[in-house]
Image (spheres, grey):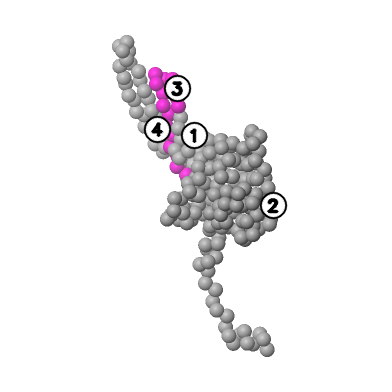
């Protein structure tokens, strides 16, 4: 009779929800320490490797306990609440020769979302957006004035500027009035931030690499006649 397959329900970072996983490997390690009272403490760590039944993403969890109590659980990679965009590595390459400030800060935002640190993440979104504006149009004295110059420079459209209204207000509210953003608030401003970063650093770079063939002179002359 074949061994029974063990199933667990874990968070999957590709499916972004809890799914059924097949346990691939389990190992238990114990460390016994003698105490000063001539008793023994038994520290136990259980390592479990499992694969998502849907997308086949592999996750590892470790659970730690001492004398059967505690049971602290860690997951690797950490559970994601928001998927990183496919172009994030292009942002890394764009930053490669510099300090990679944009890439590093964006990564920290996803970490903050995974830890449900909505307040800190909201402040981080505003900081990253201001960093980008100062990099492109210089520091004009205030967030709003930087936005105006950003618009004048053609880095964002009027439609995008209007869409940034919630980010501006959320940033002010978080900083000055103790506003407590929700997960939905953070995801809205992250949508806007990702759109702006992609259009400035990814789409523009790709457009510059496009090679449009020169227009045929005979065809151009024929069109004039």
Sequence-wise, the earlier of marks 2 and 3 is 3
Residue carrying label 4: 47
How far apart marks 4 and 3 lie (CA) works out to: 16 Å
Quarter of the image where one finds residue 204: bottom right
Tell us which disc is closer to us: 4 or 2. Answer: 2
Q: Could one spot residue 123 in this view of the protein?
A: yes
Instruction: From the viewer's perspective, tell me whether residue 40 is left or right of residue 136.
Output: left
| Neighbour tally class for label 4: few under 14, some 14-19, many 20 plus, Cα within 10 Å | some
Task: Please provide the residue range marked out in magenta.
Answer: 57-72
Q: Residue at x 53, y 69 (%)?
A: 210
**Vertical placement of 42 versus 51: above or below?**
above
Residue 180: mark: none
Sequence-wise, the earlier of marks 2 and 1 is 1
Residue carrying label 2: 162
Residue carrying label 3: 70
Instruction: From the viewer's perspective, tell me whether residue 222 is left or right of residue 42.
Output: right
């Amino acid at each position: 009779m074949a061994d029974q397959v063990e199933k667990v329900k874990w968070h999957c970072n590709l499916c972004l929800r809890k799914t059924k996983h097949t346990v691939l490997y389990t190992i238990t390690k114990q460390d016994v320490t003698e105490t000063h009272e001539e008793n023994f403490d038994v520290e136990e760590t259980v390592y479990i490797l499992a694969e998502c039944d849907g997308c086949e993403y592999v996750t590892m969890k470790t659970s730690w306990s001492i004398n059967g109590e505690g049971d602290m659980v860690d997951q690797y990679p950490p559970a994601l609440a928001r998927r990183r965009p496919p172009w994030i590595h292009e942002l890394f390459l764009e930053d490669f020769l510099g300090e990679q400030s944009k890439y590093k800060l964006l990564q920290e935002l996803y970490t903050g979302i995974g830890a449900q640190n909505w307040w800190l993440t909201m402040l981080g979104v505003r900081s990253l957006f201001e960093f980008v504006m100062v990099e492109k149009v210089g520091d004009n004295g205030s967030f709003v004035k930087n936005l105006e110059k950003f618009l004048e420079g053609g880095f964002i459209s009027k439609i995008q500027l209007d869409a940034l209204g919630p980010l501006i207000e959320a940033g002010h509210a978080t900083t000055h009035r103790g506003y407590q953003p929700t997960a939905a608030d953070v995801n809205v401003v992250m949508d806007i931030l990702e759109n702006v970063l992609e259009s400035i650093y990814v789409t523009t770079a790709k457009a510059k690499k496009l090679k449009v063939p020169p227009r045929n002179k005979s065809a151009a002359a024929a069109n004039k006649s």
